[in-house]
Amino acid sequence: MTRTRRSVTKHEVPWSVVDETVVEHDGEAFQLCRDGRSLYISDEEQTEVERYASASENGLVVNLTPGSQTYFEARAYHGQPFKDCDLVGAVVVAALGGHPDADEARRGTQLSAVWSHHLAIVGGEEPRYVAKTYAPTETRVISGDVQNIAVSGVVVRCGKK
């Protein structure tokens, strides 16, 4: 029997939401910035996010891995849906933390989508539990950068700055 691999799911977030979303982590505030079609976060390196999020005319298009999409849907089903600003927050967390798989992070593998780990951090949940429950094949060992962000946590502020 041949298994088909699920591809990424795209979610579009209106620019008005993107522009008013701030992610706080370790005493710093981060936002998603755009310069023409270039997208990056407001860190010192201006880390680009185009591999897992892109600009459309109407908003930010966020790519979720299959496991991340399953988690996204499960939260909605259980009455705790992610808001659009949470998706923006997950993009920022992905930019700060990088690849959640320790082996892939060491190899320098670039992200192509937001993983369940990134959404879990935004949702205030334990990334290991979320990955084990909703995306058991995504990663075996979580990278140190993603673990550190999970431990210190993030706050996503939606609305007026």
Image: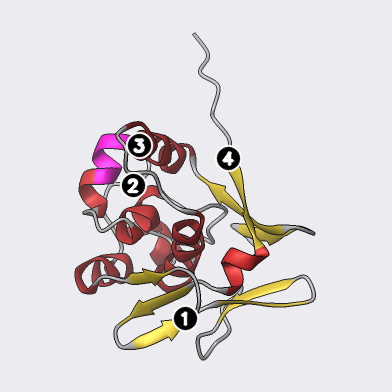
Crowd tier of the residue under label 2, counting other residues whose Cα lies within 10 Å: few below 14, some 14–19, many 20 or above:
some
Farthest residue in the front direction?
Answer: 160
| Residue at figure coordinates x 77%, y 70% from the top left | 37
Residue type at mark 2: give it.
Answer: Thr
Q: Can residue 100 be seen by looking at this rendering?
A: yes
Q: Which of marks 1 and 2 is in front?
A: 1
Left or right: residue 136 versus residue 61 is: left
Q: What stretch is highlighted in magenta?
A: 130-137
**What residue is pinned by disc 4?**
9
Q: Residue 81: where, in percent of width, then height?
A: 38, 44
Disc 3 secondary structure class? loop
Name the image colouring. secondary structure
Quarter assignment of residue 29: bottom left
**What residue is pinned by disc 2?**
139
Left or right: residue 33 versus residue 93 is: right
Q: Residue 152: where, in percent of width, then height?
A: 22, 74
Q: Are marks 3 and 2 in contact (CB under 8 Å)?
A: no
